[in-house]
Structure formats: structure tokens, C-alpha cells
Image: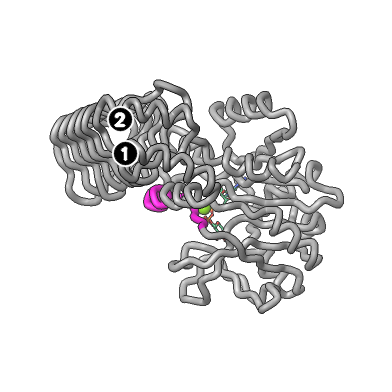
């Protein structure tokens, strides 16, 4: 198969993080979002992956260059639009890379799931479908494309962002298409798969939906990014159970109900650190792979659902849960962080509380004793008073 990843758009809903990094490069579990997709697609033996972008800055360019140098088997080809072409236009623009007989995966760059691509492809081929969408049931479908299939999976209706309830099976943004789809997309023109192409295919009875997977989330808004990290960690914990149980047992000899998801060296190191510092780990905690690339002070309790980026330094007596601390962050003593994201290079003082879907951008300073509740803070800001209500600090 071939593949194209849709990575345009401005990521404005994921500000303030996307002020400093393009959305596909914002790290989820210490790995750029885009890398999760690239790895899942590479596993299927895809040789070339088209990355469809509308704004292609230096950071993304550097990332792709490095990726291509490090991966012998798969090559990422960048296809850049002069102006945004939507979700279908970029597929046409990359036609020269995609035409032929191979089925093509089209994947949104801002979602995370188990990527059951092999099963999706098998179903697609069996049905001789033109488009096969990976579907997932969600509680609040209004922000997505809703699919109504029959028992065989043949789609009867597709409604993008329905205003009223039509169903709760949604388009995950992971689809596989037959190359004949290329003929349906106009050239050099903004075109939406969801609003223009899929409804047309419904009429022609050649669009199917396939359902599989235990979790899926669109990472495009902060609350879902935070939730997505938790779901993904739980998924990791529940797969590779044998491996993980072994790890768990080892850790449990020393720490009650502890578990860290990472490779063995880190577990050893963290054990040592924990022993020295009598800090405690609860449930899912992810730490960087490189040894000595993070520090945890005495008497901290971390977890569940914590991700620490590299070079994170945490002082004494901190409590952190359901949060991602990105690279190079420094946190003082007795600070609480809950359900939040702390941006790269931020400096958090002592006795600070950051909670309830707060998101700090790059290089934010929070002075001692401040309490931040549901606050978004733009890069390079310095905060010296508490903020109790949902606020954006520009
Ligand atoms: N190259 C390119 N050019 N990519 C684009 C453009 C563009 O003009 N516009 C959006 N994209 C990319 C985004 O980067 C993202 O990866 C994907 O296309 C979807 O765009 P979003 O803006 O995130 O759309 P959405 O989340 O509101 O809705 C889409 O995704 C849902 C699942 O998360 C739709 O496909 C829905 O049907 C779907 O349910
Ligand atoms: Mg999205």
C-alpha cells in the first residue's frame, strides 16, 4: 500500500502549544504526534509516505530530514500546497506519488488510536470498496464526521459535524482508498473529503465503514490531548501484558503498586532514584529513555498518568497526576500539577498549583504560591498572581 498523512491546518485549537511547534510535532508520550502515525504506517511495509502540508516551516523540515536519515526502509515525501487545499485537495496534488494499483492510506495527523491498519486494509480489499473508513463510537459526535452504515458496513449516510444527533459512530480520520478516488477530486482547488467526496460516494454505494479498536481520540484540543495521553498509556499497559507484568512484579517488590512504562534501564534508574528519595510512583508514569535525563526530588508522588519529558527537574514533595510535563521544565518544591500540560522550558516555582486543563506554552514562568485553574498561558509569559477562572493569558 501507499500512504498520505494530512498535516496541514494551523493547529489553532491546540494553542498555546502550537504557537511554538507545528501540531504534528507536539509530543504525545515523549514522541511527536506525527511519529506515532509514521511508525504505524511503516509497520505495514509502506515504502513511501506522502506528508501533505500547507505550511511547512523549518522545524518540520528538520524533523523529516532526520526521520529519513534514520529510517532506511521508509521515505517521507513532502507535498506542499501553496494555499490550504482541505482534506481532499492535497490527495490530488500528490497524485504523481499515489497513482497506480496500490490502495492508499489517508491518515489525519492529529489523532491517536491502535491503528488497526492491516485489518482495515483486508476489509477494504474484501469489499472492493472505493473508500473504507475506520469508524469508532464516541459519546459526543458533534465535532466529527458521523457515519451511518448498514450491517455489512456499507455507508448509508455521512454527515460532517452534525448539528443534531444522527448517530455516534464517527470517522476516525483513518481511511484506506482505492486509487480511482483520485479521479473524483478537482485539481488545484480546495476540496473536502468529508463534505464533498464522501456524500457523493454514498450515492454510488462504494464507501464502507470498518470498526475495530479500544480507543481513539482527536488530539486537537487541550482537554482531549490530556485525555488522549491517559487513554494511550492505559492501552500500552493493557497490551504486551506479559512483558509488563514481569516489570510490574519487579517493581512491586520495592514499591507498592508501582509501574513505569519504559525500558528496563529506566526502571532500574527510577527505582534507585525512588529509593534514595522515598518518592512514589502510582500507576502509569512515562519517563524519558535516556538515563539521568530527569530528576525527581525527595518525597514526591507522581501518577497516575504522568509523562515527563527529558531534562525535567522536579523539586521535593511535589504531587503530579494526569499531566504531561514537556522537555526542559523545572519545577520547584511542594508544587501540585493535575490534569494539565506544562510547556517546554517552563519554570514553575514552589507551592504552585496548576490544575484543571491548564496549558502552559513554551518558556512560561510561574512564581511561588500561584494557583492556576483552567488557564492557558502564551509562550514567554511570567505569572505572579493566582488565576481562578478559565482564562487565556496572551
Ligand atoms: N495538507 C492539508 N491541507 N491538511 C489539512 C488541511 C489542508 O488544507 N486542513 C486540514 N488538514 C489536516 C489536519 O492537519 C488534520 O490532520 C486533518 O487534516 C483533519 O483536519 P482537522 O481540522 O483536524 O479536522 P477535524 O478534526 O475538525 O475533522 C476531521 O477529523 C475528524 C476526526 O478527528 C474530519 O475528518 C472528521 O470527519 C473526523 O471525524
Ligand atoms: Mg482534528
Q: Residues within 10 Å of mark 1 (few under 14, many from 20)?
A: some
Which of the numbered marks, if any, corresponds to residue 255? 1
Q: Is residue 164 left or right of residue 68?
A: left
Which of the numbered marks, if any, corresponds to residue 274? 2
Q: Is residue 23 left or right of residue 362?
A: right
Please tell me which residue lies in front, 368 or 145: 368
Camera sees residue 44: yes
Q: Is residue 316 above or below residue 136?
A: above
Please say if the residues under marks 2 and 1 sit with CB atoms less than 8 Å apart: yes
Q: Please identify the residue farthest to the front as the structure is shown.
A: 253
Q: Is residue 87 above or below residue 284?
A: below
Q: Position of residue 393 (x, y in %)?
A: 27, 40
The residue at the point 39 percent across, 26 percent down is 269
The residue at the point 66 percent across, 65 percent down is 210
Tell me where the magenta segment starts and ends, as one range. 215-227
Which of the numbered marks, if any, corresponds to residue 357? none
Please tell me which residue lies in front, 93 or 306: 306
Q: Position of residue 301 (x, y in %)?
A: 25, 38
Please tell me which residue lies in front, 243 or 301: 243
Amino acid at each position: 500500500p501507499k500512504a498520505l498523512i494530512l498535516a496541514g491546518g494551523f493547529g489553532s485549537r491546540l494553542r498555546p502549544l502550537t504557537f511554538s511547534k507545528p501540531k504534528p510535532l507536539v509530543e504525545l508520550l515523549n514522541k511527536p504526534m506525527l511519529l506515532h502515525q509514521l511508525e504505524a504506517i511503516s509497520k505495514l511495509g509502506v515504502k513511501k509516505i506522502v506528508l501533505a502540508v500547507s505550511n511547512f516551516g523549518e522545524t518540520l523540515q528538520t524533523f523529516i530530514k532526520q526521520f529519513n536519515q534514520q529510517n532506511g526502509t521508509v521515505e517521507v515525501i513532502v507535498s506542499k500546497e501553496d494555499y490550504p487545499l482541505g482534506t481532499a485537495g492535497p490527495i490530488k496534488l500528490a497524485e504523481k506519488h499515489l497513482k497506480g494499483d496500490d490502495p492508499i492510506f489517508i491518515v489525519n495527523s492529529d489523532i491517536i488510536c491502535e491503528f488497526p491498519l492491516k485489518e482495515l486494509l483486508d476489509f477494504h480489499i474484501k469489499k472492493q470498496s472505493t473508500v473504507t473508513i475506520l469508524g469508532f463510537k464516541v459519546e459526543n459526535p458533534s465535532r466529527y464526521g458521523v457515519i451511518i452504515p448498514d450491517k455489512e458496513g456499507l455507508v448509508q449516510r455521512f454527515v460532517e459535524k452534525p448539528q443534531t444527533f444522527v448517530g455516534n459512530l464517527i470517522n476516525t480520520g483513518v481511511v484506506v482508498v482505492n486509487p480511482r478516488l483520485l479521479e473524483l477530486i478537482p485539481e488545484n482547488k480546495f476540496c473536502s473529503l468529508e463534505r464533498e467526496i464522501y456524500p457523493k460516494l454514498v450515492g454510488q454505494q462504494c464507501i464502507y465503514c470498518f470498526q475495530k479498536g479500544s480507543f481513539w481520540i482527536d488530539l486537537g484540543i487541550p482537554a482531549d490531548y490530556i485525555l488522549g495521553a491517559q487513554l494511550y498509556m492505559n492501552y500500552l499497559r493493557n497490551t504486551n501484558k506479559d512483558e509488563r507484568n514481569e516489570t510490574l512484579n519487579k517493581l512491586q517488590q520495592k514499591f507498592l503498586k508501582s509501574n513505569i512504562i519504559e525500558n528496563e534501564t529506566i526502571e532500574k534508574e527510577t527505582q534507585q532514584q525512588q529509593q534514595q528519595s522515598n518518592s512514589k510512583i502510582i500507576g502509569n508514569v512515562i519517563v524519558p529513555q535516556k538515563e539521568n535525563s530527569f530528576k525527581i526530588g525527595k518525597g514526591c508522588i507522581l501518577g497516575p498518568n504522568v509523562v515527563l519529558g527529558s531534562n525535567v527537574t522536579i523539586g521535593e514533595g511535589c504531587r503530579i497526576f494526569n499531566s504531561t510535563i514537556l522537555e526542559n521544565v523545572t519545577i520547584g518544591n511542594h508544587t501540585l500539577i493535575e490534569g494539565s500540560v506544562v510547556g517546554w522550558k517552563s519554570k514553575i516555582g514552589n507551592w504552585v498549583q496548576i490544575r484543571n486543563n491548564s496549558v502552559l506554552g513554551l518558556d512560561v514562568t510561574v512564581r511561588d504560591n500561584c494557583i492556576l485553574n483552567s488557564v492557558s498561558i502564551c509562550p514567554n509569559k511570567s505569572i505572579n498572581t493566582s488565576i481562578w477562572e478559565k482564562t487565556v493569558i496572551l
